[in-house]
Image (tube, rainbow, N blue to C red):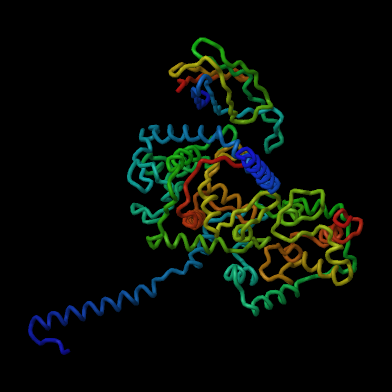
């Protein structure tokens, strides 16, 4: 229906045009002003945190590829992403140069019980523990254990102790994401939490037939 | 006949109770112990001191906090906590309770920033005014439903920023909040972990902070709990009363919507 | 000046149930601070409770009682409106007395 050409009609046409222009402008405006919440969060982290002890702002801000992906996709991931992560993490695993995988299970138990290391309340250069009991059932006598990870009690009975199992267990402790993309388990070897000897001692806790885990 | 039926019914009751008792885990027993302990919560002493501090006229202006607007109007304490964090017009930003108290201590009572944030976390011989004030103000919301709004764009932003931070994996151990708090029925050692993405868990958790912590011998706020989580996550330290913590509190408080507030509580 | 106590006294039938919450550090003297020095002992030694003129509780406390003690007990012969008076004295001579009415 054509707009009326009377004076009233021209005024109404002008009002209509103004309204339409305004609507388009605000529509555009809303689209460009939408907040990037991720960016906002990162800028707060930059300005509001202070390094203390071994816990630094630099390390917190510099997420590696895996941390970035697992933060962006915390619950659901594609098969492609899972394979990509697991392949890249498997490549980081360093097996012991001397070919010996088992250390002292008694020392392994101490490492498993120790929950300290790398916290802002810990000393720089201190000894780190694995805090394994936080998440795992390991020996029968320790009843204060968590359930975030599977039980490791009777490890040899559950998995055997052949070469494949030994290599698997080493790689799992060294970098758990070699097998489980975005695993909750810290990457003890790759992230420098436990050194080679400490991992050997934890290996012994699990794979030495004399360890209380297997008796 | 009546006696016979009564006998059978009684035997049935005894056996059904036995089954229930046999099903108790060590964590159920801990829960029972906590219920017994709940009488005589030392947090009440913090509430008393907080009420005194709220009403006390202090230097340099000889003014109390009684005109402080916690979101429901100047001086209104009842029900204020269950609506925090919220957007405040006068500062054009979202604030949680501690940020708002600092603001009032500075702008109404004339304290310097340093004085206003002094001793955020008390210890033996060094009581915290802020913890006492938080105890009093939160007690005035006891029994009320969590009702935090995310209508204002800045409130929504705080919620979304808090959510992204909840999932932010970083540091030596790759921990985020979600690492421990995004699945049901999990525990670290023997400490049960609430799934903060599950409404019932979020409600139960959020509505029982602040709490007198037996392990600390002090009333601790949600701010303290979150800072301590960050420490255990191997993160560096947030400044006291940061926007990051407010955003995280916003995320948790909104997830706890509808929960009946029951703090200050008693925890280990 | 030590912090006030919280006292509740309720008459149930013939017995008065009293609950007292006390703000006190109850330092044993065996605890070390972060620098490794012993924190000096500071604990309540004596706690007495009177109903009107009559002593209803006379107790000796020590280092086995933990921080911010909570005490609960019952006595007979009390009435609504009667006055309770609670006093504690600690090992460095600090003392505090608070009163409450039986409800």
- Depicted B199 relative to depicted B143: above or below: below
Q: Position of residue B24 (x, y in %)?
A: 68, 47
**Relative to B207, is B163 above or below?**
below
Q: Tell me: B13 left or right of C51.
A: right
How many marks overall? 0
**Which image quarter is the N terminus of chain A in?**
bottom left
**At 56% across and 18% down in the image, what residue appears?**
C75
| Residue sitting nearer the eye, B180 or C19 | C19
- On the image, the x and y values in percent for residue B154 come to 40, 60
Residue B54 place in picture, x, y as percent:
41, 36
Q: Which residue lies furthest to the left in this view?
A: A6
Residue pushed farthest front? B1
Q: Which of A118 and B140 is in front in this view?
A: B140
Q: Quadrant of residue C71?
A: top right
Q: In this view, does A18 lie above or below C29?
A: below
| Residue C13 in the figure: left or right of residue B90 | right
Q: Can residue A90 be seen in this view?
A: yes
Quarter occupied by the C terminus of chain A: bottom right
Left/right of residue B228 with respect to residue B246 in the rendered view: right
Q: Which residue is drawn at 37% across and 48% down?
A: B71
User: In which quadrant of the rendered view does residue B39 lie?
Assistant: top right
> In the image as oriented, which residue stretches furthest toward the bottom?
A2
Establish if B10 lies above or below C5.
below
Let me know if residue C4 appears in the view.
no
Q: Which of A182 and B184 is in front in this view?
A: B184
Image quarter of residue B93:
bottom left
């Amino acid at each position: 229906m054509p707009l009326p050409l009377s004076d009233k009609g021209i005024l109404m046409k002008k009002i209509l045009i103004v309204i339409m222009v305004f609507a388009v402008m605000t529509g555009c405006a809303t689209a460009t002003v939408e907040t990037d919440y991720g960016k906002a969060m990162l800028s707060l982290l930059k300005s509001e945190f202070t390094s203390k002890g071994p816990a630094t702002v630099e390390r917190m801000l510099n997420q590696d590829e895996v941390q970035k992906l697992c933060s962006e996709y915390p619950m659901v991931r594609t098969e492609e992403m899972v394979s990509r992560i697991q392949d890249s993490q498997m490549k980081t695993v360093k097996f012991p140069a001397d070919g010996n995988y088992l250390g002292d299970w008694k020392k392994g138990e101490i490492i498993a019980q120790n929950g300290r290391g790398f916290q802002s309340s810990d000393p720089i250069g201190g000894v780190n523990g694995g805090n394994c009991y936080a998440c795992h059932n390991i020996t029968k006598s320790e009843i204060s254990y968590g359930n975030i990870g599977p039980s490791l009690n009777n490890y040899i009975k559950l998995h055997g102790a052949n070469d494949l199992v030994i290599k698997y267990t080493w790689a799992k402790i060294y970098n758990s994401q070699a097998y489980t993309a975005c695993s909750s388990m810290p990457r003890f070897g790759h992230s420098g939490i436990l050194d080679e000897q400490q991992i050997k001692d934890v290996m012994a806790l699990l794979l030495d037939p004399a360890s209380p885990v297997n008796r | 006949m009546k006696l016979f039926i009564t006998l059978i019914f009684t035997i049935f009751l005894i056996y059904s109770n036995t089954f229930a008792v046999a099903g108790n885990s060590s964590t159920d027993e801990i829960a029972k112990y906590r219920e017994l302990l709940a009488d005589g919560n030392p947090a009440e002493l913090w509430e008393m001191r907080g009420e005194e501090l709220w009403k006390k006229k202090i230097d340099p202006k000889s003014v109390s906090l009684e005109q402080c607007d916690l979101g429901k109007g100047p001086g209104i304490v009842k029900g204020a906590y269950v609506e925090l964090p919220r957007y405040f017009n006068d500062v054009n930003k979202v604030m949680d309770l501690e940020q708002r108290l600092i603001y009032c201590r500075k702008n109404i009572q004339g304290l310097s920033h340093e004085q206003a944030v002094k001793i955020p976390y008390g210890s033996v011989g060094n009581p915290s005014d802020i913890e006492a004030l938080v105890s009093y103000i939160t007690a005035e919301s006891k029994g009320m439903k969590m009702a935090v709004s995310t209508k204002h764009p800045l409130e929504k932003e705080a919620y979304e920023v808090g959510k992204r931070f909840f999932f932010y994996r970083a540091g030596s151990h790759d921990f985020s909040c979600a690492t421990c708090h995004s699945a049901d029925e999990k525990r670290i050692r023997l400490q049960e972990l609430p799934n903060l993405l599950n409404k019932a868990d979020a409600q139960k958790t959020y509505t029982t902070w602040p709490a007198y912590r037996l392990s600390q011998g002090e009333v601790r706020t949600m701010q303290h709990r979150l800072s301590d989580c960050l420490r255990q996550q191997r993160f560096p330290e947030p400044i006291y009363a940061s926007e990051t913590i407010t955003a995280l509190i916003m995320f948790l408080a909104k997830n706890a919507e509808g929960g009946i507030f029951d703090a200050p509580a008693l925890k280990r | 000046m030590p912090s006030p106590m919280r006292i509740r006294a309720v008459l149930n039938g013939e017995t008065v149930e009293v609950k007292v919450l006390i703000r006190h550090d109850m330092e044993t003297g065996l605890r070390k601070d972060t620098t490794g020095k012993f924190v000096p002992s500071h604990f309540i030694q004596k706690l007495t409770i009177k109903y009107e003129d009559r002593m209803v509780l006379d107790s000796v406390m020590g280092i086995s009682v933990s921080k911010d003690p909570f005490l609960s007990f019952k006595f007979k012969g009390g009435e609504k409106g009667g006055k309770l008076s609670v006093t504690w004295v600690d090992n460095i001579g600090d003392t505090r007395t608070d009163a409450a009415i039986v409800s």
